[in-house]
Image (tube, rainbow, N blue to C red):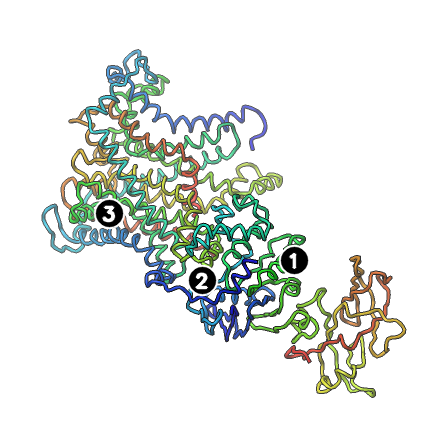
Amino acid sequence: MAISEAVGQRAFAQAPRRGWATRLLEDERWLAVSLLLPTVVLLGLFIAYPFVQGVLLAITDTKVGIPGRFVGVQNFIALWYDSIFRTAVWNTFVYTAVATVFKLALGLWLALLLNRHFKGKAFTRAFILLPFIIPTVLSTFAWKWMFDPTFSVINWTLFQLGLIHGRINWLGDPDLALISVIIVNVWRGVPFFAISLLAGLQTINPELQEAAAIDGARAWQRFWHVTWPLLLPVTMVVMLFSIIQTFADFQLVYVLTGGGPANATQLFATYAYQIGVGTGLLSEGAAVSLAMFPFLLFVVVVQLLYIRRVEVH
Amino acid sequence: MARVLIRNLNKFYDDFHAVKDVNLEIRDKEFVVLVGPSGCGKTTTLRMVAGLESIGSGQILIGDTVVNELPPMDRDIAMVFQNYALYPHMSVYDNMAFGLKMRRVDRGEIRKRVHEAADILGIRDYLGRKPRQLSGGQRQRVALGRAIVRHPQVFLFDEPLSNLDAKLRVQMRVELKKLHNRLNTTAVYVTHDQVEAMTLGDRVVVMRGGIVQQVGEPLELYNRPANRFVAGFIGSPAMNFASVHVTNGTGGLRAGNTGLAIDVPAEISSRLAPYAGRDVIMGVRPEDLEVANGGDPPGLCFEALVEVVERLGAESLLDLQVGEQTMVASVEPNIRAKRGDRLRFALRPERLHFFDTKSEAAI
Amino acid sequence: MIEGAKWRRWAYFYIPLGGFIFWLLFPFYWMLVTSVRPDRELYRPWMAPNYTPFWTAHPTLVHIIDLLTETLFTRWMLNTLFIAILSTVISLFCGVLAGYALSRLKFPFAGSLGTGIFITYLVPQTLLFIPLADIIRNFQLGDTPWALILTYPTFLIPFCTWLLMGYFKAIPRELEECARIDGATRWKAMTYIIIPIAVPGILSAGIFAFTLSWNEFIYALVFLSSAQQKTVSVGVTSELVRGDVFYWGQLMAGALLGSIPVAVIYSFFVEHYVAGLTGSVKG
C-alpha cells in the first residue's frame, strides 16, 4: 500500500528551519502583542493622549493661539460660580434622567408588544430601528421642522383636533424647550432599548411564564416576578450605554436649539463647544468637558461591579 | 524510526500537579492506548506530545529528536479529535488537503493522496460536501482521512469514538484496528473506555491522578493487574473486592470475613504469609465465580444470597449478598437462579487476586 | 398572551403598536413629503386655510435637483462615503486582530487590556474633542478627511473588538489546534481557519461601524472647516442655512438623501445589524 510504504521508507526528516519572525509569532505572547499593537497605538494616540492633554488644558489658561500658564483648579472654580455652567449641569442631569426613564419604559413596552407573533413581525422590527439607524443630525432636522413655530405640523394637528388654540413654541419657549429636546432623544433611543430588550425577552423560557400563570399570577405579577428579574442584566447594559451617550449628547441640542433659549437646553457638551470652539477659550472649554468625567466614571464603575457580581453568580 | 519516548514528564496547572513523572516508550509502529478516568492526565500527556500544551519538566522525543521546543506544525504528527474538528467552511476535500497545502505539496500530489485516503475510508463520494452535510460516522472518517494524507510519523487520537453512538463505536473500533494494520504507523490513543483500550492497544497504559499505574499488553493487565485500581478498572463487570483477614490456620493460611472463609491456595501462601494477622483485599472477577458442583474443594467455596438476576442472554449477572458485602457473578445462561436463592460458589485458585490494604499494590 | 375579547386585543396590542410605529416613522414620512413639496406650499403658516400638511397635490423634484446641482451635497456624500468606508476597514482590521488576541490567546494582562478597551468605548467624543482638535492640528491633519479616518476608529474599534470577541469565543479551539498540527503557524491558523468562520460576525461589525461613522458629528464639525471637506451631517447643518433662513425643502431633501446609503445597507443586512446590536448588549 502506498501509504505504509511511504512511511516505512522515509527516514525521520529534520524539522524545517524557521525564520526568526515566524518563531516569534509562534509564541502566544508575542503574537498577542503584535495583534494588539495597531489597536493600542490608535487608541493611545487618539484617546489616551488627548485625555491627558485635556487635563493639562483644563489646568492652564490656554486660548486659541495663546499658550497658557499653569493655573491649577482655577478654571473649575470659575465654572462653579458660572451660573450658565450650573444651569448646564442641572439640564444635563434632568435631560439624562427623564429621557432614560422614558426610553426604558417605552422601550420595554414596545419590546413586550413585539414579543408576540403577528403578521409582518420581521418587517415591523426592521422598520422600528430606523430612528436609530438614520444619522441623528438628519432626523433631528425633521423634528426641527416639525417643531417650527410657524409651520409646525404638530401644532396644526393639535389645533385641528381642538386641543390648542394658540401656537406652541416648542423650541423657543424656555419652559418647553427642554421637554421638546427630551422628546426627540426618547424618539431616537426607544428602538435601541426595544430591540435589545426584545432580544433579552426572547432568551427567557416561556415555560416560566406559563408556570406562573398556572400558579395564579396575573399578567402584572408575572412580569414583575418572572420576566423583569431575568431581563435585568440586559437592561443594565443597555442603560449603561444609553446613560453615557445621553449625558454626553451634543448633536440633538446643537441642531434643535443650540443650547437656548436662554440656556434652557444648555448641556455640558454644547457649553463646552460654545466656550472652547465658539469663543476660543480652550482651557475653560476643556474644563467643562472634563467636568463630565466624574459622573461617567461613576456610572461605568457601578456597571462593571454589577457585571462582576452577575458573573460570579 | 518513529518511536515516541517520554522521559520524566511533569505538568503543573498553577498548584495542580496534573502529570507526575511519566516515563513511557512507545515503539515504532506500536499502537499504545492511554486509558484512565477523567482527570487522570492522559489527555494532558497526549497534548504535550502534540505540542498543544507546554511541558512542565521532562523530555519528549519523537524519533531521535527532542521536540520540547518544537511547535506542533514541525513535529510531523497528525491528530484526530473527539469532536472531529473539521473545518466547517471547507469541503471534505479541502479539509483533507489543508495540511498538505500548508506544507506546499503540489496540487497533483495532493489530489493523489486525498483520493487514496478517501478510497481507503470509503468517503470518495463525499469529497465535495461540507461537514455539516455529513453524519457523525462520516465526519469521523473525514477526520481520519485528514490525518492519513499527511503520512505522519505518529498518529495521535484523543477519544475519537466517544461522540459516536454505541453501535457505530463498535463498528469504528474494528475499522480503526484494520486501518492501523494497514498503515503500520506509530499511534498513541487516549480513551476512558477500557473496552477500547483492550481491543485496540498493542500495549495499554493505565493512568490515574497523573501517575502511570501499569503498562502492559491487554491480557497481562487483565490477568496480572499491578494494583487494585487497575484490577477494578480493567474488565467489565468490575472485579469484586472484599476485605479479608488472614489467619494462620491448622492446614495453612486462611482468609475470610463475615461472609466467606477460604483456604489460601498453596501457590499464593508464600506471598500472603507476611500478612498473617492482618487485613488484605481479595479480588475476584465476576466471570471467575462459578456455581459450585460437588467436585470443588470445600476450602474454596462460599455461600451467597441472590438479590438480583440480570439475564443478558449470553450470560446472566447475579447480584449477590455475601455476608456483609455484595458481589457480582457472571454465570452461564442456563443456570437457574432467582431472587432469594442461596447458591454455593467456587473460586479457582489461579483466578484470585490479593492487594495490600494500604498501598493497594498486588501481592 | 392576550386571550379573550377582541376589543382587548385591539386596546392592548394593535393600538399601542400602531401608535409606536406611527410615532417612530412619521418624521421620515414628513421628511419625504417636505422634500417634494413646492415652496409655495411649504411656507404657508399653519393656521392658513386649505392647509393639507400630510400630502401634496403637486410633488416636485426641484428641491432635490437644486440640492444636487447648486450645493456641494454630492461632494459631501462622497466625502462621507470615503471616510466611512476607510474608517470601517481600519476598525475591522484592528478589531479582528484585537478580538482574536483577547479571546483566544493567553498572555499576561489580557484581562486588564480587555477592560481597558471596553472603557475607552465609554469615553464620549464630547469629552475629547477640544484637546483632540489641537492634536489634529499639530499632526497637520486639520481639514482633511484623514482627521476623521484616524479618529473614528477610536470609538469603532472597541465596539468591533467586543462584538468579535463574542463570535471568536464561540469557535471551538480544536479547530485551531488541528490546523496547527496540520502544519499551520498560529498566524495561518487564524487567517485560514478562524477568521473565515467568523465572517458573519465581521459583517455585522462592519455594518455597524459603517452606520456609526456615517452618524458621527462633533469631530466632523470641529476638525473640518472648508465646505468641500465636510461630511453630509455637517454640510447639511452649516451650509444649507443661509443667513437666518432655513431652506427647508432642500434641507429635508438633503436629510432624506443623506440617509439613503445607511438605510440601503441596513435593509440588506437587517439580521446582521440586529445581531450586532444584540450581540454587543448580551456581551
Q: Amino acid at mark 1?
A: Val
* Label whose residue precedes the other's in the sequence (1 or 2): 2
Task: Find disc 1 in the rendering and name its residue.
Answer: B174
Q: Residues within 10 Å of mark 3 (few under 14, many from 20)?
A: many
Percent of width and height locating residue B125: 57, 44
Asked if disc 3 and disc 2 are in contact, CB closer than 8 Å, the reply is no
Task: Find disc 3 in the rendering and name its residue.
Answer: C128
Residue B38: quadrant of the picture: bottom right
- Seen at 32% across and 32% down, the residue is C261
Q: Are marks 3 and 2 on the same chain?
A: no
Asked if disc 1 and disc 2 are in contact, CB closer than 8 Å, the reply is no
The answer to whether any part of residue B307 appears in the image is yes
Nearer the camera: disc 1 or disc 3: 1
Up the image or down, A173 lies above or below B107; here it is above
* Labelled disc at residue B72: 2
The answer to whether any part of residue B83 appears in the image is no
Up the image or down, B77 lies above or below C283; here it is below
Q: CA distance from mark 1 to mark 3?
A: 68 Å
Determine whether, in the image, residue B316 is placed left or right of residue A309: right
Q: Are marks 1 and 3 on the same chain?
A: no
Percent of width and height locating residue A226: 53, 43
